[in-house]
Amino acid sequence: MKRLLRFEFRQNSYILLENEKTVFSINAGDLKFNALQFYKGVYSEKGISTNIEIENRVDDSDKTGKYVFVWLLEIVQAISEALPEENSDSEDITPSEKNSEESLPSKIIPLFEFAACAGDGFFNDDTIPHIDYSTDVIEADYAVTIAGHSMEPTIQDGAVALVKKVDCLEHNEIGIFIVDGSIMCKRYVKKGREVLLCPDNQSGEYSSIKASSVNSCILQGKVLGV
C-alpha cells in the first residue's frame, strides 16, 4: 500500500510528516542529512511499505526547499526500486539488516546548486551553500545540480551530476569548469593543439568555447555520471 508523506517547512526546518507525525527533519541552517535518522524515521517500523509518495507543501519561492524536496524524492524512489516489496515479506531478515545491505547510502558528499557555484573553486569553499547527498559511487567527491540544457540529452536540466576531483581530463570526457568566473558543465575535446569545451546539445543554440580564447579556465572535476 502506498504511503503518503508531506514535505513542509516549519520552525527553520524542512520536515517529512506521516499521519501528522514528524518522521524526519533537516535543519535549514546547516542542511545536514543524517542517513540513520532518516532510515529510523521513515523505514524502521516492521512491515512498513517502501512505496512512498511525497507531497510538496513548501512555497515555490523557496529555492532551497525545492532542491531538498527533489533530493528526498530521489532517495525514496531509489529505495522503492531497490526494495519493491514491503519489509514484512522477509520474516527472517530484520528491516535494519536488509536496509543496511541494500539501501543505506555508502557515502555522503556535498551537493552544490549549479547557479551558486561561481568563483575560483567552489568545492573548497565552506561558504558556498550545499546539502548532504547520499551516493553509492565511492569515487564521487561532490555533486552538482545542473542548470541548463547545453549537455542534453546526456545530462538533463536539473540532473544531479556526480563529480570526482581530478587535475586533468582525457579527450571526450565531461567536466565541471569555471570559465572567467562562470560555472559550466562541458565536454572536453582536443583538436590538434586546441582544447574545446563543447556542449552535447546539437540544436545550434549552444557554442563550443576555445580554451585559448578565455582569460581563465579552471577544471573543477570529472563528471562520473548522473
Image (cartoon, rainbow, N blue to C red):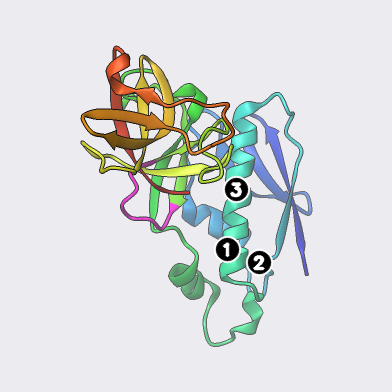
Per the image, label 2 sits on a secondary structure element best described as loop
Residue 164 or residue 132, whichever sits in front: 164
Residue lying at the far front in this picture: please name it.
192
Q: What residue type is labelled 2?
A: Thr
Residue 218, image quadrant: top left
Q: Name the residue under label 2.
A: 50
Q: Is there any visible trace of residue 123 in the rendered image?
A: no
Q: Which mark is residue 72?
A: 3
How far is the residue under mark 3 from the one under mark 1? 11 Å
Per the image, label 3 sits on a secondary structure element best described as helix
Residue 52, image quadrant: bottom right
Residue 34 or residue 184, whichever sits in front: 184
Q: Give the range drawn in magenta.
A: 135-142
Which circle's residue, 2 or 3, is located before the other in the chain?
A: 2
Per the image, label 1 sits on a secondary structure element best described as helix
Q: Name the residue under label 1.
A: 79
Check the image and report above or below for 164 versus 48. Answer: above
Q: What residue type is labelled 3?
A: Leu
Residue 110, image quadrant: top left
Q: Quadrant of the N terminus?
A: bottom right
How far is the residue under mark 2 from the one under mark 3? 14 Å
Residue lying at the far bottom in this picture: please name it.
92
Which circle's residue, 3 or 1, is located before the other in the chain?
A: 3
Q: Residues within 10 Å of mark 3 (few under 14, many from 20)?
A: some
Which circle's residue, 1 or 2, is located before the other in the chain?
A: 2
Are discs 2 and 3 less than 8 Å apart at CB?
no
Residue at the image point whose x is 69% and y is 69% from the top: 49
How far is the residue under mark 1 from the one under mark 2? 7 Å
Are discs 1 and 2 less than 8 Å apart at CB?
yes
Q: In this view, does 40 lie to the left or right of 213?
A: right
Q: Locate residue 84, reporting x and y percent.
A: 64, 72
Residue at the image point whose x is 75% and y is 61% from the top: 3
